[in-house]
Amino acid sequence: MKIVKSKKVKNINEKTIIAALDIGKGTHYAYFRSPSGKDIKPFPFNNSRKGFDKFWVRHCQFKSEHNLDETIVGFESTGPYAEPLFHYLRKKPVKLVQINPMHSKRLKELTGNSPNKTDKKDPRVIADVISLGHSLTLIVPEGAAAQLRRLTQARERAMKRRTAAKNQLQDLVFIIFPEFLNIMKKISTKTSFYLIKNHPTPESVAVLGLNPLATIIKKISRGRLNRKRAEELYDAARKSVGIKQGRRAILLEIEYLIAQIGADNKFIDSLEKQMEVYLEKISYSQSLLSIKGISIVTVAGLIGEVGDFKRFHTISEIMKLAGLDLYEVSSGKHKGQRRISKRGRSLMRKLLFFAAINAVKSKGIMHEPYQQMLDRGMPKMKALVAISRKLLGLIFALARDNTLYDENYSNIHDYKLAA
């Protein structure tokens, strides 16, 4: 497994050509600049093999004309549109870097003293950022880490689809059986989902009868819901004010949404099983899984986002990658509050935040420091972010040393120091 560490690229010598790219879905724009300041007008090329070859030929011509030896190719951090070109260029003798969009946005007005944004202007601004030494080398996960990143992203998309489908299902059930949600509380529970799938209308629940309904609810909920809940639902079904006009069409959509939710559930399960397979190929994955409350999904997602923890030398590098590094805005007598930058990978922050929620529970590993923060008057949200930072530090240390988590480590360490 190989990865390029994200760090600032500052050294651009007198033999380096800067190739800046403005990435688009169908068409990219390229711009070349030599160390002497000579450049060419930005030109378009298609997102295809023919277009990539056109870019490379133009690059080689410019490089030869100005007697240059090295090439730095830079573009803004973007979505999937840059990936085919990125993998094409990885096989070429160039250094790939990325630009923080916030940096290029603030430099735009230097070109023409205008906030004007065009495909021809953007590559010049990207080149300016590279020249100033504010570009970052690309983080390139490979092997098992690359698979984990794709699996995590696929799971995130499936979760969003499933949540949207559940929200739509809830709206439709409310139209034909509004009392259902008041009694069953959540539509996402196993019992609610079974009843909607098999008995979606109040009439079908009433026809079922009280005793059979009570038996079904007790069986599906494994005894967590008693007969009283069945009586409430049965009584509500007999007196329901749900609409009957256009119901057939609503039932068709409910059937479709139930099938979609079921398919998403199976897909998510299959993704999580694949995560387990690829985690076995990561040497330090078991070290991270040894932390109480950290799930397979969290570990797989973090490794996929980072690429390889062992390629980072300090915790501050990981904090910046996650966007959990702190900053403040102070001036004169004004002392600003410290906040996280949020300029890193948002999925990393999400995974760590939900891991922090588990860690601060009554028997969680971060329960005590979390309570201490609250006792000092820190808001709950801010405390959870602080716990996220602590968890990331712990994860980095375990991955670096390839050791298992020891819940009593602090007590033992303090005892040795006292001795």
Image (cartoon, helix red, strand yellow):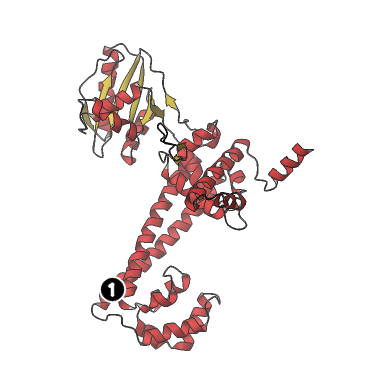
| Image coordinates for residue 335, horizontal then vertical, percent | 44, 37
Q: Quadrant of the C terminus?
A: top right
Q: Give SS at disc 1.
A: helix
From where the camera sits, is residue 307 visible? no
231 or 198: which is nearer to us?
Answer: 231
Residue shown at the point (57%, 52%) measured from the top left = 375
Residue 1 versus residue 204 in the image, above or below: above
| Image coordinates for residue 217, horizontal then vertical, percent | 49, 79
Amino acid type shown at disc 1: Ile
From where the camera sits, is residue 199 visible? yes
Q: Residues within 10 Å of mark 1 (few under 14, many from 20)?
A: some
Residue shown at the point (72%, 45%) measured from the top left = 411
| Image coordinates for residue 391, horizontal then vertical, percent | 56, 45
> Which residue was labeled with disc 1?
250
Residue 315 versus residue 175 in the image, above or below: above
Residue 175 versus residue 34 in the image, above or below: below
